[in-house]
Amino acid sequence: MTRIKGAVVIQTEQCKGCGLCVEACASNVLTMSVNVNSKGYVYSTSLNPELCIGCASCAVVCPDSCISVYRQSVKEERD
């Protein structure tokens, strides 16, 4: 059986910290960082990257296009 595993890449220097991606993520992968980028904005970051299903909702809602989502098929082994 295969399933889709996702990976979110956030360009933190472009992120303005609007938080739309955090709200759009149904899998609770993203959160707002406690740090700021060089422009002084709090940016989004992956809190639970292993939960990403690759739906790309976060990338679709990002107004600054600073999120990329990659998908990979993962074969699960049966016991």
Image (cartoon, grey):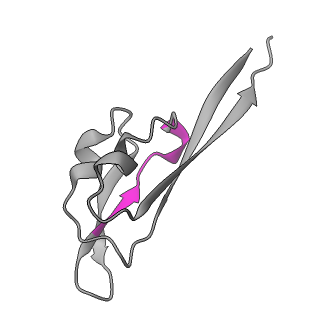
Please, is residue 16 above or below residue 69 in the view?
below
The quarter of the image holding the N terminus is top right
Q: Is residue 26 left or right of residue 6?
A: left
Q: Is residue 26 left or right of residue 68?
A: left
Residue 33: quarter of image: bottom left
Residue 37: quarter of image: bottom left
> How many marks overall?
0
Query: Whole-percent x and y of residue 58?
Result: 35, 47
Within the magenta stretch, is there residue 32? no
Q: Which residues are magenta?
A: 43-51
Q: Is residue 46 left or right of residue 17?
A: right
Q: Residue furthest bottom?
A: 38
**Residue sitting at x 32%, y 88%:** 38
Q: Residue furthest top?
A: 79
Please, is residue 65 above or below residue 61 in the view?
below
**Residue sitting at x 31%, y 70%:** 15
Query: Whole-percent x and y of residue 79?
Result: 80, 11
Within the magenta stretch, is there residue 48? yes
